[in-house]
Amino acid sequence: MHVTLERILVIRNDRLGDFMLTFPTLILLKKALLTTELHVLVPSYTAEMASACDAVDEVVIDPGPDTGFSKQLELVRQLRKNRYDASITLFSTARIGWCLRFAAIPYRLAPATKAAQVLYNHRLVQRRSRSAKPEFEYNLDLGLQLLEDFGVSRPPILVPPYLHFSDEHVARLRSQFCQRHNIAPQRYLVFIHPGSGGSANNLTLHQYSELTQRLRSYREHTIVISAGPGEEATAHELAALLPDTPHVIYVSDQGLRRFAEHIQFADVFISGSTGPLHVAGALNRRTAAFYPRRRSATELRWQTLSVPEHRLAFSVPAGVEEGDMQAIDIEVVAAAIGERFLRP
């Protein structure tokens, strides 16, 4: 295909965790297409993380499906004005398919799934519902398909971290955090994020409480209970269950980027399969995550972007209801986290 790629639009406009798993694809495209502008279409609440990705040149805000025809028309006009040579839709809906078509983008690539696939002139069969590999690899396959279609060589293999903030800045932030909460600087900071935003199965607060009591480290540690907007009550409920465990509450009320900067200084990040977990993965932090056994939500499909030695996953065992998170053995979890992440 003999077309100059001056500007590409990548669409992943659903949840935060889903968007974080596009970072390898965005970096791949930027490394392969150094002179091409890379734009992303995202909802407003993930825009901060899109801007934090070094591969992204411009963020376009998706008004969402519930904003009426006039807002969709504005989006089409903006996309047409930006004159994209190609688009990659990582999460396809009919609304987005129509917008891209009306924006007259000549090359429109999407997974060959759902009825919306007829709105794209380039499609890749993936069968993501089988959950045969990680979500980020499905995303990468679409990026690689575009490069192949345009005769562009694949760049060298990418390695984590896919997101990184200045070490000096993060060290200063950690120091300030420890001073504010009277935490000795040599202690491990073990982040636990008990909220899920309604997007994933998670442990109960009593399970998290048991986990903190069973954790053993070769150096003393402090539990940091993290919470996003609307999750403050959950954080305080968990804190009330930890009368004898050193802990503090960190409420992310200064935006996603500042939350991500705090996650970068976490020694371990523990949560269900939710957005902040995948931020931690993109930062290559040590992560411990909990998953149901449901095929669409497996630990393989939604594994974090951390290198394997920085990644632990615990799933509902066979023989019980696939979503019964209380069947996860917390004693086993605590021992694994301590052995893998909390030793010298």
Image: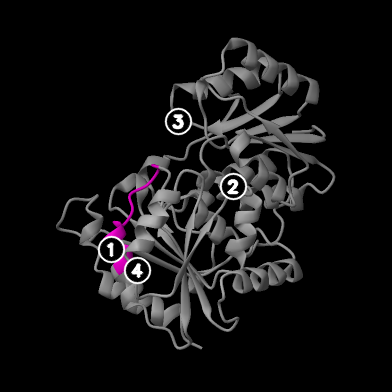
Give the residue at mark 2: 22
User: Which callout, 4 or 3, points at the residue further toward the start of the chain?
Assistant: 3
Viewer-proximal residue among 224 and 14: 224
User: How many numbered circles are shown?
Assistant: 4
User: Disc 4 and disc 1: Cα gap in Å?
Assistant: 12 Å
- Which residue sits at x=53%, y=21%? 65
Give the foreground label among 3 and 1: 1
Give the residue at mark 1: 207
Residue 335 is left or right of residue 57, and the answer is left
Which residue is farthest left?
A: 319
Let me know if residue 300 appears in the view: no
Q: Quadrant of residue 161?
A: bottom right
What secondary structure is found at the residue carrying circle 2? Answer: loop
Give the residue at mark 4: 242
Look at the numbered discs 3 and 2 and tell me whether their residues touch, using CB distance below 8 Å.
no
User: Disc 4 and disc 3: Cα gap in Å?
Assistant: 46 Å
Q: Residues within 10 Å of mark 4 (few under 14, many from 20)?
A: some
Q: Residues within 10 Å of mark 1 (few under 14, many from 20)?
A: some
User: Which callout, 1 or 2, points at the residue further toward the start of the chain?
Assistant: 2
Q: At which x and y percent is residue 140?
A: 58, 48
Report the amino acid beneath label 3.
Thr
What secondary structure is found at the residue carrying circle 4? Answer: loop
User: Which callout, 2 or 4, points at the residue further toward the start of the chain?
Assistant: 2
User: Which callout, 4 or 1, points at the residue further toward the start of the chain?
Assistant: 1
- Which residue sits at x=30%, y=53%? 292
Give the residue at mark 3: 113
Is residue 69 highlighted in magenta? no
Q: Residues within 10 Å of mark 2 (few under 14, many from 20)?
A: many
User: Disc 1 and disc 2: Cα gap in Å?
Assistant: 31 Å
